[in-house]
Amino acid sequence: MADWFAQDALRQQLSSQTYAVRQWRNGQFATVDDRLAEEVPIALVYNGVSHAVMLASPRDLEDFALGFSLTEGIVQQKSDVYAIEPQIRNNGIEVHLEIATEQFVELKARRRSMAGRTGCGLCGTESLSQVFRLPEPIDMQRVQQPISVQSVLRAHEEIQALQELQRETGATHACAWADTSGAVGLVREDVGRHNALDKLVGALASQEISGGFVLTTSRASYEMVQKVAMAGFDMLAAISAPTGLAVRIAEANQITLLGFVRQTQLVAYAHADRLVES
């Protein structure tokens, strides 16, 4: 147990490092300390077989492994994952997952090599049929209660103060879960926006949280919408713009997609009818 806590503390420490830099300010150079976010190779190993290597921030890796497994369709539910164990290596971190036999057999059938880089959405995808992994469209009769514009704006305001790694480094994305009132309950950060979302999805699954909506400090790519849909949520609010493909996927899957969320504004790109003024 002591070794586990030591490794967890080391992973948190590895998330950012201090570097001496030369800064030009007020007409002169000065040597100052700067805190930089780190990218670490993370190998996801299923039942002893390495499946994917991603570059990510080395924190919340249990959440990352579970969220990635769910949003990639490797497992269908949290109970399909029996154990998750991160192991620090000399050249990175391996996260070993023990998953149900049925899911592992399916994984081997479609196994591919996917060497990732920050923000890589299609690395290692072998065919067009592998691009879209979408669940059945959400039954509109089961959609959560409407969300007010003020709730979305409140979540945007709250997330700013909850980004610890971003404050240290200025180089990371965050994804947050907020309840219907806009109160932020969970935040996960990473150098990659997709990784941050996978970490959030894993945390939500671990705590069996549903309802509310997801907020991201990045643009809304098609994969972000896809991951939100796979996780069973029906609203994604982004601080930046969506892509056209993201909007079409949101439309087809009854996902409310918001962009350009700021202090006093937002733009609804898909299923705006779920938003209410107050």
Image (tube, helix red, strand yellow):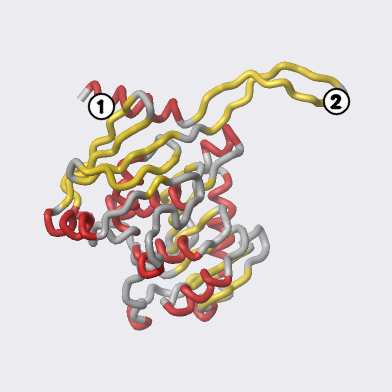
- Say left or right for 168 vs 70: right
Residue of label 1: 4
Instruction: Name the quadrant of the C terminus.
Output: bottom right
| Near-viewer residue (123 or 248) | 123
Q: Where is residue 142 in the image (x, y as percent from the top left)?
A: 33, 78
| Near-viewer residue (86 or 231) | 86
| Near-viewer residue (143 or 42) | 42
Numbered disc 2: secondary structure: loop
Q: Which residue is drawn at 46% across and 68% down?
A: 235
Numbered disc 1: secondary structure: helix
Residue of label 2: 26
Gap between marks 1 and 2, in whole Å?
A: 47 Å
Q: In this view, does 253 lie above or below 170?
A: below
Quarter of the image holding residue 87?
top left
- Say left or right for 112 vs 227: left
Q: Is residue 59 above or below residue 153?
A: above
Q: Where is residue 207 in the image (x, y as percent from the top left)?
A: 28, 51
Amino acid type at circle 2 is Asn
